[in-house]
Amino acid sequence: MSERSERTGGAAAQPHRREGASGRVLRFRFDGREYEGLEGDTLASALLANGVRAVASSIKFGRPRGVYAAGSEEPNALVQIEEPFPEPMLQATTVELYDGLVATGLPGQGRLADRPDPARYDAVHAHCDVLVVGAGPAGIAAAGVAARAGARVILADERPEPGGSLLGTAETLDGRPGREWAAEEVAALAALPEARVLRRTTVLGHYDDNHVIAVERRTNHLGAAAPADVARERVWRIRAGRVVLATGGHERFVAFAGNDLPGVMLAGAARTYANHYRVLPGRRAVVFTTNDSAYAAALDLADAGVEIAAIADVRQAPGEAWAARCAERGIEILTGHVVTAAKGEGEVSSVEVAPRSETPRSETQGGGGGARELPADLLLVSGGWTPVAHLFSQAGGTLRYDEELGAFTPGETRQAVEAAGFARGVRTLRACLEDGAEAGRRALGAAGFAVPSGPAVPSEPAVPSGPAVPSAGEEPAAAPAEHLWLVEAPGDGGDYGTHFVDLQRDVTVGEVLRAVGAGLTSVEHVKRYTTAGTAHDQGKTSGLLTGGVVAHALGVDVAELGTTTFRAPYTPVSFAALAGRDRGPLHDPVRVTAMHEWHVARGALFENVGQWKRPWYYPQRGEGPGEDMEAAVLRECRAAREDVAAMDASTLGKIDVVGPDAAVLLDRLYTNMMSTLKVGSIRYGVMCRPDGMVFDDGTVIRLADDRFLVTTTTGNAAAVLDWMEEWLQTEWPDLRVHCASVTEQWATVALVGPRSREVLARLAPGLAVDNESFPFMTWRDAEVAGIEARVCRISFSGELAYEINVSSWSGLALWEAVMASGEVTPYGTETMHVLRAEKGFPIVGQDTDGTVTPQDLGMEWIVSKKKADFVGKRSFARADTARPDRKHLVGLLPEDPGVLLPEGAHLVETSALPEPPVPTLGFVTSSYRSAALGRTFALALVSGGRERVGERLYAPIGADLVPVTVTSHVLYDPEGARRDG
């Protein structure tokens, strides 16, 4: 390869690249084919340079789709990056080309990565006096004025380099190309001590009090060469004193037949490809416009070497200066014409144009007589420009309709935010520069800074004199634009099947008209009916067009119809970026007890309970395969029922409730009375939601008159603490109570079984452990294995049991002492579940589902009749909670004692299933094999269950109906005789 082709790729390698393009050659692969591009390309510009027209396909109809725009407004060209890491649903127009990039086109939806993302993501907080969003002419002017006055300024722009609209034009400032002017101005700005320039940074959302969220893409453009120690993306959480939105505008298209074909492109985008990327998006173009901006695009493309077949202008009188320039270039101007169809097999090959119909209307036009078909491979469309008001609207600003612009522009807002430049409808380059500078002055004044009287944007920043704004040259006078939404095409069948208003969602004019015909008169309702404006682009090019078609169909003005709601994020953002470093253990921390390493060393398998790693069971490893889960759990159960066993119960939630009104708080939150509990005693309690449904259960230990220790389920510990704080802070702030989580301050060992008293007596010789001295549901302070401990007589198994609580620092020492005290069998959560289910003790969240009351669980006794009130009490008086057919917790015994019912299995009354819908009586909540019962059993919530004890029901399992007998939910030791040993 020659030196020139190595530098530019050569004409053969990139047949649509303009002469004179330079840059390092980058090699990439798209849809399985190898291509070359240049440094500075986007994937879209590189594909166009290689003559690739069809980039993706549409989501609903599978129609080929090509590049339509040049930035984040792109509705069509969605791709998936395959290497170095899979990332779906990216716009080819925003993917910066890098060496080794591998990508594929998408049919409107992508594929999630099948491996962990190795990249880092982070987040930072920043404060500034003035935040300027957008580094186009107005934004640069605003930021320059504010920063040079000493204000803390952040200038954020989503592109790799500043300039905004200047990057896509041939305009000059102070005799320099606009791109050079922007680069120099921003470089000088970045050198100021209180200024920060954020490139490749998209402001996604604008929230209350000028809290702004932005995402900076730091290494996406480097591909495999990205440093491993630099975050790929960074979330900026910015709190700004004032915000200036210099966000520019998006060009819109028009609905006509075939307006989605590859080769149809926004005129401003084609101009950008020709000027900024030095790429020719086609060879022969037809231009279809409603305004003067497309004339500048046509001239730039003609200068680049594209043949302009004709300009079809819906107006009778375009701007005279523009028309004269085009006439000098021999470009045919068809005034009063519309494009009725783009034609071609898979891409544009010709364009049909026709005079406007004799009865002109601004919203819709049909082709009159004298239609012509012009050969062309490129159709450039400009239906007008829409200011980017998304962030302004998110900030609570109101929008007003600009008749001349044919779009909604920012109006008023209560926040310290304003729009500048074209974002508020300012038309010309010179006016945008002046408007941006004035916005910078207003922001300075509002932030308390002295407003400078000097130049706004000097030619040379180091020189204090000069013009107020750079010289922008003479801009031709513009003729009024016309606002056209729809071109009716004869022969389309009246269904407008290829007149698209939302290219990404495949929404056609016909679907919009059907929505209106169904009675929908709100543009918000039409949006939801058709899905227009709900895709990744959030209606940037299609939103106003959809509204225009709706307004036309209803016969109302677009201004009267309004807009849809602009919601964050402005552009799609990856979940990884939002998570930042809060991934894996940092997002959902792995919590382990003080005894965790002992469990690991003994081969325990673990169960995730909330964030905790809890030992699930301890399979014994011997010769051969060793124990499976069933064998290990049955062995552990036998030890707990017949001998002695121990469980690490440290993960139970523990909350200190302290203060003179602690008992009052607990009385209000629990269904039973807690204020009558004596110091040294323990009481089981249940909390309900205001609707009377069980929220959590646990024990309450009274440590002193004004101090209680509340235990909760492992998974609900944080929720219970939050529940307590919510009531204290919002409903009962007069209560003198403080609550604190102490879950991790205590390590707990549950010692269970007929021999547990014997083992405890050896470990704590100073503690009287007989029933009379240490009765059930009391606690004692003692030394256990030489460690200060709080010992509780609590049983969640129905057996004689103790819970020994020590400082977490001493947890491992206590556990090892218990294990060394004799033949104590460690058991895990699965055994604990079997033991408690045999006794009919429910697990909140497993045997309850948010629709269960204490009475449904057979726990009427725990609902106090002495207390005047508690959370949920009034709901027990509702007719619904007294229905006889409410689901009750019951036991189930399969007729075949070897059959294990799957949890979640439904229950029916008949031995043969009727035709659907099949009525269900309830479902299985817990199901186990029991060593003590010598069979399988289950717990279930069954409609009117307590009245069905003894009945036969059926559980559909696959193709079989398994017969089961309803029993009491207490299947083992119903008298409770084993509790005291």
Image: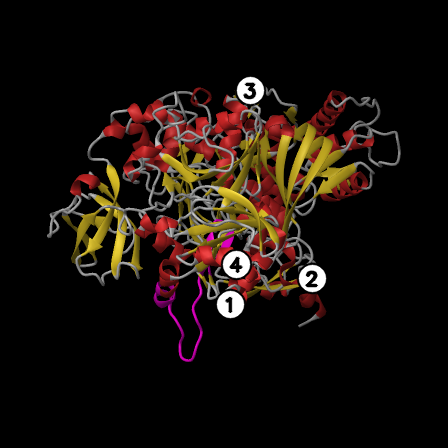
Q: Which numbered disc, 4 or 3, marks the residue that appears first in the sequence?
A: 3
On screen, residue 869 above or below 684: above
Task: Name the residue type under label 4.
Answer: Arg
User: Could you tell me which secondary element the residue under label 1 belongs to?
Assistant: loop
Identify the magenta region.
606-634
Q: Position of residue 722 (x, y in %)?
A: 51, 34
Residue under label 4: 762
Task: Name the residue type under label 3.
Answer: Asp
Task: Please give left or right for residue 259 compared with residue 602 in the image.
Answer: left
User: Could you tell me which secondary element the residue under label 3 belongs to?
Assistant: loop
Please tell me which residue is depicted at 44% across the width and 38% down the height of the picture.
534
Disc assigned to residue 602: 1
The residue carrying pointer 1 sits among few (fewer than 14), some (14 to 19) or many (20 or more) residues within 10 Å by Cα, namely few
Say whether residue 612 is visible. Answer: yes
Task: Name the residue type under label 2.
Answer: Arg
> Is residue 629 rendered magenta in the image?
yes
Measure the alpha-carbon separation of dots 2 and 1: 60 Å
Q: Which numbered disc, 2 or 1, marks the residue that appears first in the sequence?
A: 2
Residue under label 3: 734
Say whether residue 408 is visible. Answer: no
Which mark is nearer the camera, 3 or 2? Answer: 3
Measure the alpha-carbon separation of dots 4 and 2: 80 Å
Q: Position of residue 402 (x, y in %)?
A: 54, 22
On screen, residue 903 above or below 235: below
Measure the alpha-carbon separation of dots 4 and 3: 48 Å
Residue under label 2: 24
